[in-house]
Image: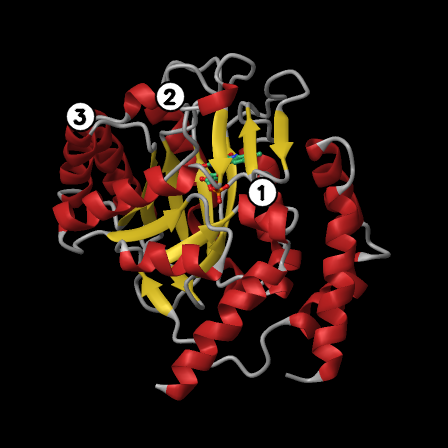
Amino acid sequence: MKAIIVLLRWIVGTFHKLLNLYPSPEGAHTLFVRCATWPILKPSLIWLFKKCQTPNPSPKPIQIEGLCLEHPFGVAAGFDKNGVLIEILDALGFGFIEVGTVTPNPQIGNPKPRIHKWRKKQIMINAMGFNNDGILAMKKQLSSLPKPLLKKILVSISKNKNSPALLADFGIGCREVWHLCGGITVNLSSPNTQGLRGFQSSEEISAISDCFKKLQDEFGPTALYTEPRTPALFCKLSPDLSDDQLKACLDALRDSAFSGVILTNTTIDLGEFKTTHTGGLSGRPLKEKADRILKLATQHTRGTLFTIGVGGILSQQDASDKFSSGARAIQLYSGLIFKGPGLLWQLTDSAFETERCS
Ligand SMILES: Cc1cc2nc3c(=O)[nH]c(=O)nc-3n(C[C@H](O)[C@H](O)[C@H](O)COP(=O)(O)O)c2cc1C
C-alpha cells in the first residue's frame, strides 16, 4: 500500500483517538457532526477520507430492489440519525449507509446523559429514545444528494414516542422518502421507545407489509432508476426474542413484501450493568447473542431473506463470523466508535484483496 495512504490513515486514526478521549460519548459525537458538517471543513474532510479509501477496489455491487450495496460493509442506524453525514460516510468508503431512525415528527429523545461507554470492555449502553429532527428534515437532506448516492441509502423509520399507531407513522415516513432512497427499514426493536418491541409479531409484520404494498401501488417504482425498482423493505429485530418469536417473525417476513431482515438491534440484557443502567447494550458482549440469532435465522429461512448482520463487530474475525453465520452484508456501529474508520478500511482492504486473488 502506498505510504501516503498509510500516513493519511494514521492522521485520521489519531484524530479519532483524540475524539474518543472526550468525556461525554454523546458530546464527542456531536462535536464530530459539527466539524463534519461545517461548510469550511466538510470539503477538506471529504477529500481526506476519500484519499484513505482502499486503493483500486473491485467491488461487486449487490442489488436488492432499489438498494445498491456497493460492497457488503455498511454503517448501522443511529450513527447518522438525521442524514447529515451521508457524504462523509460515503467518503470514508462505506458500501451502504443506514440513516435514522427517523420519526414523522421531530422529538428530543430521553434526558441526557443517555450514552455510556466502557472503552476497555468495548461496551456501549444507550437510551437515546429516537432523538431526531423528523422525516421532513431527513427528506430535505436526501433531496440535496445525487441519485447514485441515494441508491445506497437505507432509511430507518419508526414511530413517535407519543403515537399509538406504528402503521400510520410508517406510512408517513415511507411517503416522504419513497423516491429518495434505495431502501427502507422498519425499526421494531429499539428498547428505548416503550411498547415498540411488542410490534415484533407475525400479525404486525403482515400489516406493515400490506401497507407497503399499497404504497407500491400508489407510488410505483422509485425515481432513482430507469428500470422499475421499488425501495427494498427491511425489518430490524431484537436479539432478545425467543426462538419461537423469531421464527414467527421470519415466517411473516418471508411471505410478504419484505426483502430482508437486519439482525440485530441492542440487547436489554445489560449483564453487570443491569442494576445501574437502563437502555440497550451494544459492542463486544452483544456479539455472541446476535450471532446465535443470525445463525438460527439463516437455518430457518434457508437464505430466502437477505440478512444483514450487525452487533459486536470489532475486528476482521468478528466480521467473518457474521458471514459464516449467514449474513450477506454487515453493519458497524460500536466498532466504528471504538476502532474508528480503520476497522472499515481493514475489512475492505482484505475483502478486495481476496476478491482480486480468487
Ligand atoms: C448510540 C446508539 C444509537 C442507536 N440508534 C439506533 C437507531 O436509531 N435505530 C436503530 O435501528 N438502531 C440504533 N442503534 C443500534 C445499532 O444500529 C446497532 O444495531 C447496535 O448498536 C449493535 O451493533 P454494534 O454492537 O456494532 O454497536 C443505536 C446504537 C447506539 C450505540
Nearer the N terminus, badge 2 or badge 3? 2
Residue under label 1: 79
Nearer the N terminus, badge 1 or badge 3? 1
Which residue lies most toward the right here? 40
- State the image coordinates of residue 44 (x, y, percent, origin top left): 80, 65
Count of labels in the image: 3
Ligand 1 within 8 A of label 1's CB? yes
Q: Amino acid at mark 1?
A: Phe
Q: Residues within 10 Å of mark 1 (few under 14, many from 20)?
A: many
- Seen in the image, is 1 located left or right of residue 287? right
- Seen in the image, is 320 located left or right of residue 11? left
Residue under label 3: 203
Quarter in which the N terminus is drawn: bottom right
| Vertical comparison of 216 with 104: above or below | below
Q: Looking at this view, is 357 or 132 the one in front?
A: 357
Q: Looking at this view, is 225 or 341 the one in front?
A: 341
Question: Spatial distance from mark 1 to mark 2, Cα to Cα?
Answer: 20 Å
Nearer the N terminus, badge 1 or badge 2? 1
Quarter in which the C terminus is drawn: bottom left
Q: Residues within 10 Å of mark 3 (few under 14, many from 20)?
A: few
Q: Are circles 1 and 3 on residues that touch, CB within 8 Å?
A: no
Q: Amino acid at mark 2?
A: Leu
- State the image coordinates of residue 12 (x, y, percent, origin top left): 74, 61
Label 2 residue SS:
helix
Q: Are circles 1 and 2 on residues that touch, CB within 8 Å?
A: no
Can you tell which mark lies on residue 182?
none
Label 3 residue SS:
helix
| Vertical comparison of 199 with 325: above or below | above
